[in-house]
Image (cartoon, rainbow, N blue to C red):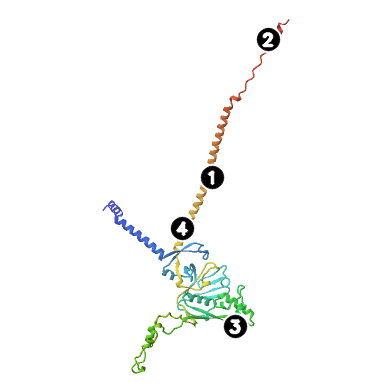
Amino acid sequence: MSRLDRKVRRLQRRNSQSHAFFLFFVLIAIFAASILARYYVIDPVQIPDSSMFPKFKERSVVWVCKLPQCASSAKEQDYVLAKFYSNVYMIRRIIAMPGDTISISDKGKVITPHRHFKWKGEDAFIQTQSIYIPKIGDTLRFEQLNEVEQDYLISYLHSLGEKVFVKTTLWQGEREINIDRVGATKIANRQVSLKEIDFLPWQDRYLIELQIRRSEPGNSPIKLKRKLYRIKQKELPPTNIAEQDSLQDSVDISLTPPGEVAVPEIAKVDTASDEPQPPPPPEETAEPLDEVIITKDCYFLACEKGSNCPDSRELGYFSADHIVGLHLKTPDKIKAKFVDPALTYVKAAEVVAKDIWRIVKDSAEKAYNFVVEIFKSDEADESEKDDESEDAPSKKVKKPQPTKPRKSAIKREDMEP
């Protein structure tokens, strides 16, 4: 088969109806795959503030992968899409993995097993603290945790739907003292109430301990100790008819007098009481919670800036369920390599075009004004010529004629004797 025949057949195949249907099917498949990828695989997320500056600018858009495999493969220093407890989604950076221990000083110096860095303007930590990031399977004893870890553990339990609360006591060394002394302290020029002592963050409790220690005699340290409790529903006796029937079925017939039929107690109940009654409210009991078993890996997420930014410093641990996406670096690379230079060239071309347009506009205005002035000058010259031609007859001057001598007078003088 010659080359010309092959080209002819190839052209016939490309122009055939089946080939057109095949291309249409491919386009539909690509369009459907892109829609599925957009809604179920990748998602653009806009950063509303400057919390991630200088990595991401305010109102910049980043692409994240929402697949479970992407979220589970997140590593230290990766940027992830985290779901906050108030159903708010934000981009944050992982600075500590499950099982890591980090240290944050009051000057913003952060020490992790992977790197050291410093937050500028960090104001959340007023005291140097060491924090352990729990991993799945860890057993944490509440009394052995420091103040920050206790707050983070309570926040973690609340995120899992656990009903817990704490009870605070005041200790001076090994001796418990009256908790009412907390009422004499102030935070931000405000008197501290005993009703809020169980809910204060660790920074406020630390300031309260310092104030009480200054007012109390002795060198024993002042400590606000807390005990953790879990709220559980109390088991109630059976209330439905089926359970009562099961109890009445065990009536001993031998105790029934002769000639009488054993009647269960449920049959002796008034019919008015057979109507379904609303169940009583469940009773709740509190039991001490000394140990907590971690059921999910936890992460420490943070902003790029040091202050006024909600992250793990304020909200505590983020479990694996709260990490819903992983930042994709490929779109950023494409953007940095192609899109940003193109936008730079477009902006430069726009500036050049504006300058050229301004120059052309100024030149056109100057040329127009010059032509207008020429026409005006020509019209002025023509009008002057017309005026001169109209005034020419009236302005003619008569030439003076020479005077002739008086001949008659001379002749008379000559004729006299």
Mark in front: 1 vs 2: 2
Mark 2 = which residue? 408
| First of labels 4, 3 by sequence position | 3
Q: Relative to residue 336, is residue 234 depicted above or below?
A: below
Do residues under tags 4 and 2 come within 8 Å of each other at their CB atoms?
A: no
Identify the residue at horizontal 70%, vertical 9% (top origin): 410
Which dot marks residue 339?
A: 4
Q: CA distance from mark 2 to mark 3?
A: 163 Å
**Is the C terminus in the top left, top right, bottom left or bottom right quadrant?**
top right
Q: Residues within 10 Å of mark 2 (few under 14, many from 20)?
A: few
Mark 2, secondary structure of its residue:
helix
Mark 1, secondary structure of its residue:
helix
Mark in front: 1 vs 3: 3
Which dot marks residue 93?
A: none
Mark 1 = which residue? 362
Mark in front: 4 vs 2: 2
| First of labels 1, 4 by sequence position | 4
